[in-house]
Image (spheres, rainbow, N blue to C red):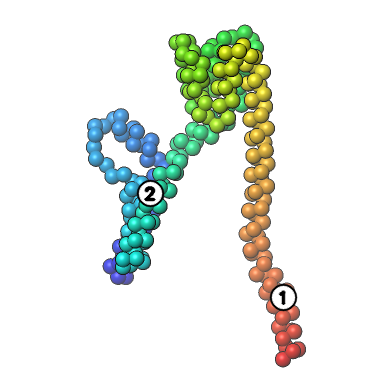
């Protein structure tokens, strides 16, 4: 193995190892910021992008390799920065999963006569998790006299919760019934989830058929078409 090949292999291995740890990096970085003083640490995203560009430059070689490697490094840097950390993805999925139940429970509390802040606080304690934390901040903000738009903004960033926030703000401004709007929201979210699950199941069926087709197609050609072609060519020749 030449020196260039060795450097190429080491660069690719290092870049792969860094990329594998990029997803959990933002959370670890935030924890380190809180527990340690300012220390210089290499940025794993930029380091992985630089190693990938270096590997491509070695593989291509020459001035062209330098140009291509620089382009690959920039593209890798932008791509890796868009990756969602595993912890953030798990948090987002749980918030989306808990949202229909939270809307139903808040609606039930409102129908029982509880104020909005009390209903939100009770539901936050009941469901717990990341969405419960957001609802607890909503209830705390409402108790402290914050504007409804500001208070419900804590949950507006959750996928599907924008309708909840808008309904709550509209109810505080016009006196519209919030319980009915939350019930309809929960039903719509469950219907959307059912449609998405059905589409995913159909897509999985198609993806399963493709490998089977790729496996059976060569066998069909070899067992069915090739003997016929050989027999025809034999008769012709």
Q: For the residues labelled 1 and 2, say whether their Cβ atoms are less than 8 Å apart.
A: no
Whole-percent x and y of residue 144? Answer: 45, 10
Residue at mark 2 = 77
- State the image coordinates of residue 71 (x, y, percent, origin top left): 37, 56
Classify residue 124 as left or right of residue 63: right
Residue at left offset 40%, top offset 47%: 78
* Outermost bottom residue: 237
Q: Secondary structure at mark 1?
A: helix
Depth check, front residue: 74 or 197: 74
Q: Viewer-nearest of labels 1 and 2?
A: 2
Q: Residue at x 35, y 51 (%)?
A: 48
Q: In the picture shown, does residue 62 fall above or below 27?
A: below
Q: Residue at x 52, y 26 (%)?
A: 156
- Indicate which disc residue 225 carries: 1
Q: Judge whether 223 appears above or below 175 on screen.
A: below
Left or right: 51 as drawn, with respect to 40: right
Q: Is residue 24 left or right of residue 161?
A: left
In three-dimensional space, the C-alpha distance between marks 1 and 2, rounded to whole angstroms, equals 49 Å
């Amino acid at each position: 193995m030449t020196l260039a090949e060795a450097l190429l292999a080491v660069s690719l291995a290092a870049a792969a190892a860094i990329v594998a740890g990029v997803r959990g990096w933002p959370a670890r970085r935030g924890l380190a910021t809180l527990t340690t003083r300012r220390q210089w640490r290499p940025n794993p995203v930029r380091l992985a992008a630089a190693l990938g560009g270096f590997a491509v430059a070695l593989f291509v070689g020459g001035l062209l390799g330098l140009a291509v490697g620089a382009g690959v490094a920039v593209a890798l840097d932008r791509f890796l920065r868009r990756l969602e950390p595993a912890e953030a993805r798990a948090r987002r999925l749980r918030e989306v999963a808990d949202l229909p139940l939270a809307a139903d429970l808040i609606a039930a509390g409102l129908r029982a006569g509880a104020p909005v802040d009390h209903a939100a606080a009770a539901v936050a304690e009941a469901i717990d998790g990341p969405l419960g934390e957001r609802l607890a901040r909503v209830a705390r903000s409402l108790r402290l006299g914050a504007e409804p738009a500001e208070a419900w903004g804590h949950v507006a960033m959750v996928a599907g919760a924008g309708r909840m926030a808008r309904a709550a703000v509209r109810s505080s401004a016009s006196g519209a019934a919030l319980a009915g709007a939350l019930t309809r929201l929960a039903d719509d979210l469950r219907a959307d989830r059912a449609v998405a699950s059905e589409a995913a199941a159909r897509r999985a069926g198609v993806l399963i058929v493709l490998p089977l087709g790729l496996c059976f197609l060569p066998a069909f050609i070899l067992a069915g078409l090739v003997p016929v072609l050989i027999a025809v060519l034999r008769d012709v020749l």
